[in-house]
Amino acid sequence: MDSPEPDQTPFSAVTAQTSKFSRQYQAYLDKSTPYTIYRWIGTGVLLFTFLLRIVLAEGWYIVCYSLGIYLLNLFLAFLQPKFDPSLTQDEGLEDGDVSASLPTKQDEEFRPFIRRLPEFKFWYSATRAVAIGFFCT
């Protein structure tokens, strides 16, 4: 009456398949990283197809409107710097720190422009949003 336990339970089998799928998906994303132009062309084609679907269906405008607002939010986050230099200067002046000013010498630290939302995350979020918009219509 003592039956041997199976090596793999159904839950662990599903977990193994899910992790395998997620590794394959991440490998695909990693391989697509250097092809910036082709990624954006694909997203543009997907967006154009979505908009064509909205126009031909003559409906689902609220989904299109919501997608537009979300894409605009992503675009603005892409354009903004991660650290706003004007805010750090204002904080120093509010505290009474006179040394908080723009660099005046060559040997002071250079701070490069770092985006709040990197390009790859911008592309990935935009493409995912358009695909979800397709699903919602």
Image (cartoon, rainbow, N blue to C red):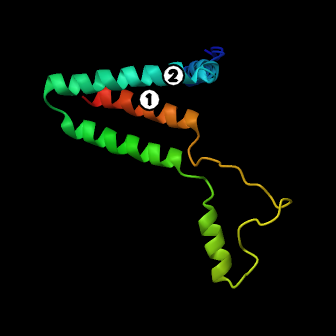
As drawn, the label of residue 39 is 2
Find residue 54 and name its label.
none
| Depth check, front residue: 62 or 34 | 34
Q: Give the secondary structure at mark 2.
A: helix
Q: Residue furthest left?
A: 58
Toward the bottom, the furthest residue is 96
Quarter of the image with the C terminus is top left
Disc assigned to residue 127:
1
What residue is at 73 percent from the left and 81 percent from the top? 98
Relative side of 108 to 1, left or right: right
From this view, report whether residue 85 is shown above or below residue 131: below
Q: Is residue 134 left or right of residue 101?
A: left
Seen at 59% across and 40% down, the residue is 118
Q: Amino acid at mark 2?
A: Arg
User: In the structure shown, which secondary structural element does the residue marked by tag 1 occupy?
Assistant: helix
- Of labels 2 and 1, earlier in sequence is 2
Q: Are marks 2 and 1 in contact (CB under 8 Å)?
A: yes
Of tags 2 and 1, which is closer to the observer? 2
Q: What's the CA distance linking mark 2 and mark 1?
A: 9 Å
Residue at point 25%, 37% (across, down): 63
Spot occupied by residue 11 in the image (x, y as percentages of width and height)? 55, 25
Residue 33 drawn at (x, y percent): 62, 24
Left or right relative to 132: residue 28: right
Where residue 42 sits, quadrant-wise, is top left
Tell me: residue 99, above or below residue 108: below
Where, quadrant-wise, is the N terminus in this rendering?
A: top right
The picture places residue 77, in percent across and down from the top left corner, at: 50, 48
Callout 1 crowding tier (Cα within 10 Å): few <14, some 14–19, many ≥20:
many
Q: Amino acid at mark 1?
A: Thr
